[in-house]
Amino acid sequence: MKKRNLIVLLSLFLLNSCIVKSLHPFYTKKNLSYQKVFIGEWDNLTNEKGHWNIQSFREVLLKKNKKNKPSELSTDNQKIYNHHKASYLITYTDKDQNKATFSATPFKIDKQLFLDFSPFEFFSECNSLNLLAALHLTGTHSLVKFDIVSDNSIDLNWLDEEKIRELFKSNRIKIKHEKTGPENDILLTASPKELQKFIKKYMKSNDQKKWDNSIGFNLKRNNAKN
Amino acid sequence: MQKTNSLPRNSSHNSIIFNLLLWLCSFAILLFSFSQNNTPEKIDYIYTACFLATIIIPATLNLYIWIPYFLQKEKYVVFSLLFIITILLFSQINHWFFDSLIDDIFPDYYFISYHSNTKLITIFSIFLIASMLIRLSEDWFYLNTSENEKLKLENQQIHRQLNSLRSQINPHFLFNSLNVIYSLALNQKKETTQAIVQLSDILRYVIYDSNTPTVSLKDEITLLQNYIDFQKFRHPESAQINFDTIIENDTFKIYPMLLLPLVENSFKHGIEARIEKTFIKIKLTNTKGKLHFLIENTYDKANSKQESNHSGVGLKNIRKNLELVYPNKHLFKISKTNKTFTVSLKIDNNEN
């Protein structure tokens, strides 16, 4: 079990190390855009194979607590409900059957859909995790370009850290950020409003490869599991 | 700026140099601030230049329209309203500019994290107030300099007048003195040499010692005493001449040769052969920083020429002198009866 935890942690670390991370979410309440079509079972067939279970966060919360209305939830759960009511609860299982859950909030900027991705439970299946280690972890947000190709096909593309690193290197960007760790990983500390300003500008940029080199998945609906 | 009630237009104000200096300094300050103490990069220069452009417009509006037309014309309420509206409007324009317009001008640059609306209003307020204070300081500096120049000119004019008045005393006095010596020499009096020495002492004082802004009261008394002794050669022994002094501080400073014309005037008009029992009574008192000079002489109203056109020159000169040297610090009073002519001069050297 311990070996499994380590693998999950490592894979999360590797995943995090090449995507743009932000302390604050990329969305604001004003531009939330919930897409029901995303709910269901999905497989990524390209690159690394994996399975995606997408659920409505609020429905899962009510179901888990065996409640019909959010008002029947406990105060703590009501807070969680209100925070994630427009989000998906995503359970991602990689090719080695390692699982992790994420909260993904869909939002729209200039007709383009995005997901604000953040880890929800690092070790959802394991109760024997090192609590002290868990206390040191802070969930950051990442930006995913969310394209609904059809009802059965969805593309997810993360914003690559290398892209923003290039902007910093060429001194073409002024955005609040911190550099952390021995690799000087970039952690954006700008406000959601500022982050959205950045997304707008980034989407308008002439860079034709703005979503290249990033982590991406082409998901196909798995009708067999539905 | 135009002429106003409060501050005069600064004619030496060079708008180009003033604005060039003001905005170059502002650019340096903003660049340092926006670079967050790092070496400024190209994006910082672009951002600072654009940011400054949005400040220059309201600041210029404030400096060249709001201040001269409203603040300096004491329309404080209108000025305050315009000032606040300008700050709010242009800080919002700045926000709009950096929110959208700048992306069209510099599509390759990402100007994301800079200032909140509150911070923008604060920056605009600071710049408008600072530029206004600099402009008003410049006006004040100009006003102060021109005031000093004006005072210097007035001072020079006063000195020219004083020198002119003093130069009128010398030939007048010399003329009378030479008459005395001539009279003594004509009668082959043995006192002639003594009179010449006394005149020499008087002239030394008049020519050399009195060429300072002030002299001590002691020196002035010596002059008066020499003058009185000298005049005694000229006038009959029957003439009663008294010179009493009550001096508390003989280092008391007075304007030189101030009292001599009064004594000279008394001798000239008070001691006349046709007047019986002639006298001159002089009393000089100095106490508590104040000086009182009182001189009284016999006077024949019917035949007097005292204060006539010719003799009035001396008194007129004294009046002018006093107005220039002791403005609002003296009291000069002339009183006459049928038989006496009195002049009283009070000087208060104490600072109010």
Image (cartoon, coloured by chain):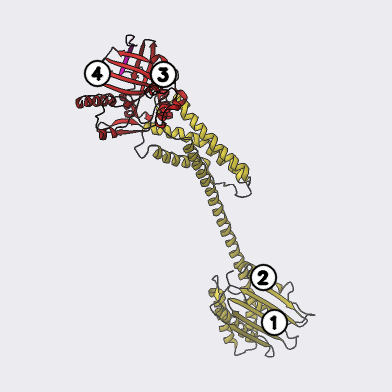
Chain colours: A red, B yellow
What chain does mark 2 sit on? B
Q: Nearer the viewer, mark 3 or mark 4?
A: 4
Q: Which is in the foreground here, disc 3 or disc 2? A: 3
- Ranked by sequence position, the earlier of labels 1 and 2 is 1
Q: Is residue A90 above or below residue B232?
A: above
Q: Is residue A213 magenta?
A: yes
Magenta region's main secondary structure? Answer: loop
Q: CA distance from mark 1 to mark 4?
A: 129 Å
Do the residues bearing badges 3 and 1 touch, measured as CB atoms within 8 Å? no
Q: What mark, if any, has residue B319 been given in the picture?
A: 2
Q: Quadrant of residue B155?
A: bottom right
Q: Which residue is mark 3?
A: A113
Quarter of the rendering occupied by the C terminus of chain A = top left
Q: Chain of mark 3?
A: A
Residue A97's disc is: 4
Are discs 1 and 2 located on one and the same chain? yes
Residue position marked by numbered label 1 in the rendering: B296
Direction from residue B335 to residue B229 in the image, left or right: left
| Front tag of 4 and 2 | 4
Q: Amino acid at mark 1?
A: Glu
Residues indicated by labels 3 and 4 sit on the same polypeptide chain: yes
Q: Is residue A205 above or below residue B73?
A: above
Q: Is residue A22 left or right of residue B206?
A: left
Q: Earlier in the sequence, mark 3 or mark 4?
A: 4
Q: Mark 3 and mark 2: span between their CA atoms?
A: 97 Å
**Separation (CA) of disc 3 from disc 4:** 29 Å
Residue positioned 62% across, 45% down in the render: B76
Q: Amino acid at mark 4?
A: Gln
| Image quadrant where one finds the N terminus of chain A | top left
